[in-house]
Image (tube, rainbow, N blue to C red):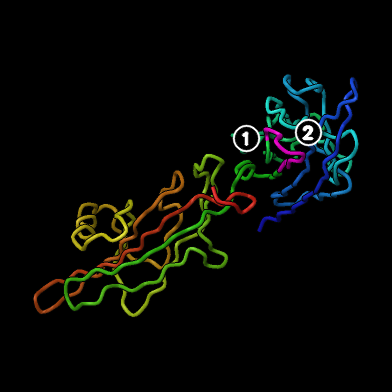
Amino acid sequence: MKKIAFYSLSLASILAIACSGGSAKQTSHGDVELIDRTKAAISLDSTDGTVNGSYGANCNDRAGSSWVLHVAGWQVGDLSVDVNDSDCVLTLESVSLNGHSYAASTGIALASGWAASAPKFTEGSNEFAFYGNAKMSDPSFSTTSFSIQLVLSDDANNGADNKAAQYLVSTSSYTQTNEHAPDYSLSLTTADDEFTIVSDANDQVLSVSGHANFTAGSYTGEEYMIRSDLGDAPSFAAVDGAWNANLAEHHAMASSVAAADFGLSSLPTTYTVIIKHQAQADAGSVTTYQTFRITFNQAPLPDGGAR
């Protein structure tokens, strides 16, 4: 499992005295939250590190100059922006940790969402160290404090808002006779085999792993198929019609289905898994079905909040 380390800092607001006229100008100061998603975790020392960048051309009194923000906490001379200077754009360009300096291949213009892609950070001329991405809590600087969240990863796909998606599952049974329908249970969170989806900041699916695992109850089925959403409560006729219209998609019933078999491309999305049982009765062949309607929702935000 990838280690995730969090560093959160708190700052008090201060007043900076302007150079002329003696008036007081209120400034907004940042803090840093570092999230380490590297497989071989970087040793992040909260007492020895800085995030570094530059002020944009429209930043009041600071245009074009560089800024530094200490991971251990704001210090005099660190990054500050005038309150309500909403035209000011900050660009993150490098990170210094434990005496090592890592430069981004492309500067990250800080905004309320993650950058579209995570640039490489290198130490020295070409020694790759990790991927990084960043966003900030208040790019309009409407208050006296804001937070910069920086995620570091040795997987480019994890250099953004990537967490396992959440699931909603409902099941139904369909029969037209006294013959029992299958009664499997479904798990997407089986230990060491969790159905995991990695998505980017735009909810496009980057990779999947794990399985949907079925546990047989008292009654089993012989075949299954994965279909696009049939709705919350489809009729027997709708399920039977979907089954018979897609013969090439039938598979022998298995105890698990690989996440890749769902063909996920974006979130949120919903699929229906149909399990069929066919039995012989006095009047001939009898067909029953069980369905699982699975909704793959967007990943939660890094702070746990809703979208």
Secondary structure found at label 2? strand
Residue shown at 81% from the left, 33% from the top: 26
Task: Write the residue at 40% across / 58% down.
Answer: 294
Numbered label attached to residue 115: 1
Q: Which mark is residue 226?
A: none
Q: Is the residue 244 above or below the residue 288 in the image?
A: above
- Name the image quarter holding the N terminus: bottom right
Q: Looking at this view, is 255 or 268 the one in front?
A: 268
In this view of the protein, which residue sits in the foreground, 53 or 164? Answer: 53
Q: Is residue 257 above or below residue 82?
A: below
Residue stretch rendered in magenta on the structure:
139-149
> Which residue is nearer to you in this view: 151 or 55?
55
**Residue 227 seen by the camera:** yes
Q: Which structural element holds mark 1?
A: loop
50 relative position to 150: left or right:
right
Image coordinates of residue 86 in percent, x first then y, are 68, 28
Look at the numbered discs 1 and 2 and tell me whether their residues touch, using CB distance below 8 Å. no
- Amino acid type assigned to the residue bearing label 2 in the image: Ser
Q: Indicate the position of residue 97 as horizontal and vertical percent values.
A: 84, 42
